[in-house]
Image (tube, rainbow, N blue to C red):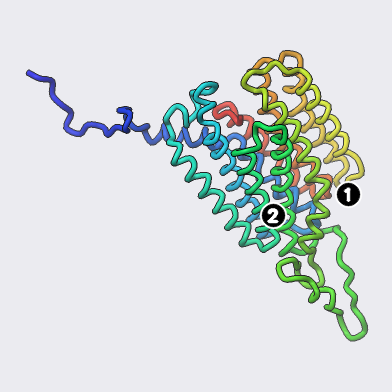
Amino acid sequence: MSPRRPRNPAPTDPLGQPPPRPAHRRAAWAELLRISAVLTVPGDAVAGAVASGARPNRGTALAVGASLCLYEAGMVLNDWADRHLDAVERPHRPLPSGRIRPGAALAAAAGLTTAGLGLAAAAGRPALATATVLAGTVWAYDLVLKRTAAGPAAMAAARSLDLLLGATATATVGPPADGARRRPDHSGPSGPDNTASTSRPPGDRGRAGRGVTASEGLRAALPSAALLGTHTLAVTAVSRRETEGGSTATPLAAAATTALIAGTLGREPRPGGGRVATLLAGVYAATAGRPLAHAALNPSPHLTQQAVGGGIRAMIPLQSALAARAGARHRALPLLALLPVARRLSGRVSPT
């Protein structure tokens, strides 16, 4: 007798392999999306919001959503662009292992980018303009610039733009933060003079008489964006050697950059943020500096990857310190609470 055939054989893909189970498929997407790194994203918008001089508001929430979508689009697109190289260097990744199809990954990257731009558009034209430049930078980095000398600078620009997205989205629709410098009222005996308010271009206007324009918010947030971008530049430079290791100078340079940023965070903060900003700067320096020092002493691939992961997680205390430095301690400490969660998730899904 011939062996009995199953009544409902499992469907197979064109290569003859059964499709992944739903749980395995979810795990593959979690790995592709780098869910352990996604917690480093909301702080960009919050730090940009408080640096702009306006209170976090609906625009801030929209900026957080847009940032998350664009960040995840970059993660997926990065693996799609590297799928042939990963087949040699990291065949366990979701695309070369066949757990996710390249077409599905590319469609997800396009869909996430569209969603991010849509959320930014809901926050106003200045936010949409910033998000458009950010999305273009992300796609240019993943598809063209990543393996060129301009790669680290492009990644740094993307992270800086992410913070500025929070600033422009918040400042466009919100009143100034408590303690922030307010616009002169120009009130006279006959009442307030609204000439300055009505002369602002549409879409670049806060609430009349008490708002912060998007251009003002952007300028105010530039120093914070520069510090975040500098950190990103250093971490990205280290990440270029994470699969082969062998570099001592790059982790050392990144550690020195971390110390410089931490020192800057403790200088000349706005009133009310000094001690907290200094404390958070120390948390940032420890989170990023310790694994960088280990990688400098022993530049193996494993320790280099650990240094990159630590540098990614260190963005959380960096964002917290930037918020405290801007005088928003009540925003800074909740952000820091994301750090242990990100560290725990990184034990399950690598952030790199």
- Horizontal side of residue 63 vs 80, given as left or right: right
The local crowd at label 1, few if under 14, some if 14 to 19, many if 20 or more residues have their Cα within 10 Å, is some
- What residue do we see at 83% from left, 54% from top? 220
Residue 322 falls left or right of residue 79: right
Residue nearer the viewer, 305 or 289? 305
Mark seen at residue 130: 2
Q: Is residue 129 visible?
A: yes
Location of residue 125 by image quarter: bottom right
Question: Where residue 20 appears, x then y in whole percent?
Answer: 37, 32
User: Dot 2: few (<14), some (14–19), or many (≥20) neighbours within 10 Å?
Assistant: many
Q: How far from the left and from the top, in percent, is residue 267?
A: 91, 40
> Dividing the picture into quarters, in which one does residue 34 lie?
top right
Q: Which residue is mark 1?
A: 270
Image: 79 above or below 65: above
Q: Residue at x 88, y 49 (%)?
A: 270
Image: 76 above or below 127: above
Q: Which residue sits at x=87%, y=48%? A: 272
Kindly identify the amino acid type of the residue bearing the numbered disc 2: Thr
Is residue 213 placed above or below 347 in the rendered structure? below
Residue at far bottom of view: 190
Earlier sequence position, callout 1 versus callout 2: 2
As rendered, which of 116 and 337 lies closer to the eye? Answer: 116
Can residue 334 be spotted in the picture?
no
- The residue nearer to you, when weighing 74 against 297, is 74
User: Could you tell me which quadrant the C terminus lies in?
Assistant: top right
Q: Quadrant of residue 193?
A: bottom right
Residue at 80% across / 75% down in the picture? 199
- Per the image, label 2 sits on a secondary structure element best described as helix
Looking at the image, is mark 1 or mark 2 nearer the viewer?
A: 2
Left or right: where does residue 78 sit relative to residue 12?
right
Residue 45, position as x, y percentages in the image: 70, 49
